Amino acid sequence: MPEIGLIDYQAGNICSIANAFEYLGAHVIHVRSATDILQASHLVLPGVGAFGFCADRLKASGLLPAIEEWTFAMNRPILGICVGMQLFADSSDELGLHQGLGWVGGKVRKLHSSVSAIRIPHVGWNTVVFATDFGEYQSGEQADFYFDHSYAYHAPSKGQVLGTCTHGETFCAALQRDNLLAVQFHPEKSQTAGMRFLRSFLSM
């Protein structure tokens, strides 16, 4: 049984994520200490709210050194969701310039739309086009996922873009680099497509 370490740093909606993994048969560990991390087979970094708030909460939690050792020294799989994905970047300009974790490079910028009918924030269902194979998904496949955001990650390299979405502009909706996986959408709220994605993560 997979042991999902759900990083609880008081900046994420962890209940729905926990329920989704439990539905798939995984056991969820609420990570509040470095010891908790060692029990996990996979880590999940959620995030809801402003980038700067989430970055500050993660640093204040004291968990970051253990998370980075687990991710990079131990080379174990980690999934960032929503702002959790954005934290993987170098920086964000949301409400000022804020430093990210710098794990995958790139920057987080506000979505732009020149069409008045396309509103920001981007809330609701939208189509993700997969750029490469990933688990149950094949390159070129399209699936609908649930989004709720105003800022998006812009990758420095197309090679790490797993999937794209268009809302006013085309942005990176999912990325993968080695054992690092991150998504702007909410798989836990995306019904069948989301469960397929989380199952694919569990196979990493």
Image (cartoon, rainbow, N blue to C red):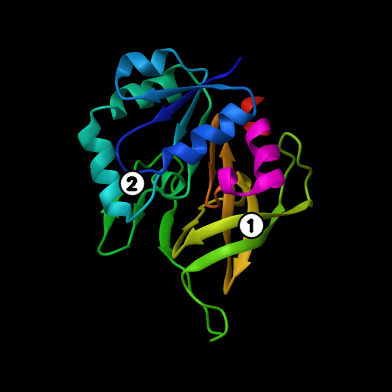
The quadrant of the image that shows the N terminus is top right
Residue 151 on image: x %, y %: 43, 62
Residue 34 on image: x %, y %: 31, 18
| Residue picked out by circle 1 | 164
Q: Earlier in the sequence, mark 1 or mark 2?
A: 2
The residue sitting at the left extreme is: 60
Q: CA distance from mark 1 to mark 2?
A: 21 Å
Taking the spot 36% from the left edge, 24% from the top edge, the residue there is 31
Mark linked to residue 100: 2
Q: Would you say the magenta stretch is mainly helix, strand or loop? A: helix
Q: Dots 1 and 2: beta carbons under 8 Å?
A: no
The magenta segment is 187-199
**What amino acid does circle 1 point to?**
Thr
Taking the spot 59% from the left edge, 45% from the top edge, the residue there is 187
SS at circle 2: loop
Above-or-below relation of 58 to 90 = above
**Alpha-carbon neighbours of circle 1 within 10 Å: few (<14), some, or many (≥20)?**
some
Q: Quadrant of residue 115?
A: bottom right
Taking the spot 27% from the left edge, 64% from the top edge, the residue there is 95
Give the tally of numbered discs: 2
Above-or-below relation of 21 to 145 = above
The residue sitting at the bottom extreme is: 116
SS at circle 1: strand
Q: Is residue 178 visible?
A: no
> Which sits in the foreground, 188 or 40?
188
**Alpha-carbon neighbours of circle 2 within 10 Å: few (<14), some, or many (≥20)?**
many
**What amino acid does circle 2 point to?**
Gly
Taking the spot 46% from the left edge, 42% from the top edge, the residue there is 104
Q: Is residue 47 visible?
A: yes
Q: Quadrant of residue 24?
A: top right
Residue 76 on image: x %, y %: 51, 21
